[in-house]
Image (cartoon, coloured by chain):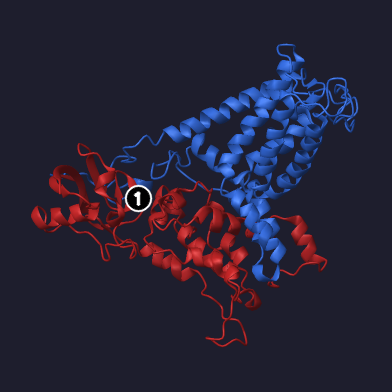
Amino acid sequence: MSSYEARFKVWRGDVRGGGLAEFTVEVNDGEVVLDIVHRIQATQAPDLAVRWNCKAGKCGSCSAEINGRPRLLCMTRMSVFTQDETITVTPLRAFPVVRDLVTDVGFNYAKAREVPAFVPPPGVAPGDYRMAQRDVDRSQEFRKCIECFLCQDTCHVVRDHEENKPAFAGPRFLMRVAELDMHPLDAAAETGLDRKTTAQDEHGLGYCNITKCCTEVCPEGIRITDNALIPLKERAADRKYDPLVWLGSKIGRRTTDRPR
Amino acid sequence: MATGTEPHPDGRGVRTATRAAISARHLRTDRWWLSPAGTAAGLLAFVVYSTWRAFADAHYYSAPYVSPFYSPCLAERCQTMHSGPNADLFGSWWALSPAIIILVFPLGFRLTCYYYRKAYYRGFWASPPACAVAEPHATYSGETRFPLVLQNLHRYFFYAAILVAGVLTYDTVLAFRDSGHHWGHMGLGTLLFVVNVALIWAYTLSCHSCRHIVGGKLKHFSRHPVRYRAWRFVGTLNARHMLLAWASLVSVGVTDFYVYLLSSGAFDDPRFF
């Protein structure tokens, strides 16, 4: 096993201020950035705050920015860097900092609560749900989400414009709206909840300019933009911007809430 | 040790006071600017070329080939093309190049295309220039207001693009003639036309609006097996939408330039048979 000494800059501080602290730390074959952060904690900075849990890319806890790119600390191999490279690790820059590499991601939980939950179909008891696989394939892709919130962090709508946070749910939760709207048994429409319209009116779908950063950073490889956000935009366009669909609904050729 | 940075009390974006106090707009160390710069340069080159050709009003027909920029040709001033895409809908009052009439539709289709939106938002408007690179704008309303709310009309440009692709297919069939309009011949231009129309169709059908219309809007694929298969087919193309967007952009430019070379006498079409 070979090892070398790597140069790291890790942001340390809290909401009152902070800066990049420099470390020189041992790196061994096969290690990931989270291993190195843990080594810094163990040998040089025992009070360094970092949030982590599974170390397997499935819990979504160790989200941070490595050389300016939103990534999971546990899924970023040290072998992708050259040995003479200085590696910079900072907390997520779209959310309020708590301390060191830990941020307050409460914004995302607030947005999660704003998305109305799955509406069970009337007359079908839980356990009696039956769905064709082809009908749930789309939603199941979105269920791979580990809620690391890297997509929320990189989305410039809120990253670069704090004032948009009240109006914009972010890619993760627009994807949740898409997931439910594509769900074969979701009966929201029968209760008067039109997810296509609320995506635009209440969750800020119109702010998305489909520049695909959410897709680029997703550690699960979910095609958020192509498979969730753009289809949702097209569904919203059906409701709000397509005079032919509107006319069809008026003359009875289409109904807005009939599942098809 | 830490180099102390105070929070920016009046900061915005990544410099908002509650966020980690880092003064740099971004900390990316890769060549993040290369992709938007290349995209902007490519699009700009095409805009310059197509503007020149669209307003030139000349050298767009060399039997049996008609430039895709001038097809269909809808004004009286159009050059007569034997069995070609002439349709004098605009009469003699249209004084500008007839290309302007028809180019509005493919231009609108590409301007509102979900891929090109990403490309020019990043490349020209820096919104954002690259992922996790702060954009320079003080405010942002996305596609919620006029004029960008009009991007939602993409599906109508898609319908128009289908018609234009149909006309270009007709032009490609006509390209299997010789300069005397006899059928059963083929030249290098015919090959270019075939490749171009194939790429135009692939790009048009890979459109996100097409994907929605053929089946994406459905909640139950299992009740619509034919539309499900169509949706899967379009989805396969859609995964290569960016590639097809560029390939068809280049092919339409090359095809037009080839017709220009033939029409201006700078080049003779090599005939295969």
| Vertical placement of residue A113 versus A48, above or below | below
Q: What x and y, as percent, mark residue B234?
A: 64, 52
- Residue at 34% across, 37% down: B30
- Residue at 34% across, 56% down: A95
**Could you say which is closer to the camera, residue B173 or residue A184?**
B173
Let me know if residue A25 appears in the view.
yes
| Vertical placement of residue A68 versus B86, above or below | below
Dot 1: what SS? Answer: strand
| Vertical placement of residue B161 versus A98, above or below | above
| Vertical placement of residue A193 versus B110, above or below | below
**Could you say which is closer to the camera, residue A135 or residue B70?**
A135
Chain A tint in image: red
Marked residue chain, label 1? A
Q: What x and y, as percent, mark residue B128?
A: 46, 42
Q: Quadrant of residue B89?
A: top right
Q: What x and y, as percent, mark residue B12?
A: 37, 46
Kindly identify which residue carries mark 1: A70
Q: Disc 1 residue type?
A: Pro
Chain B tint in image: blue
- Judged left or right of residue A75, residue B84 is right
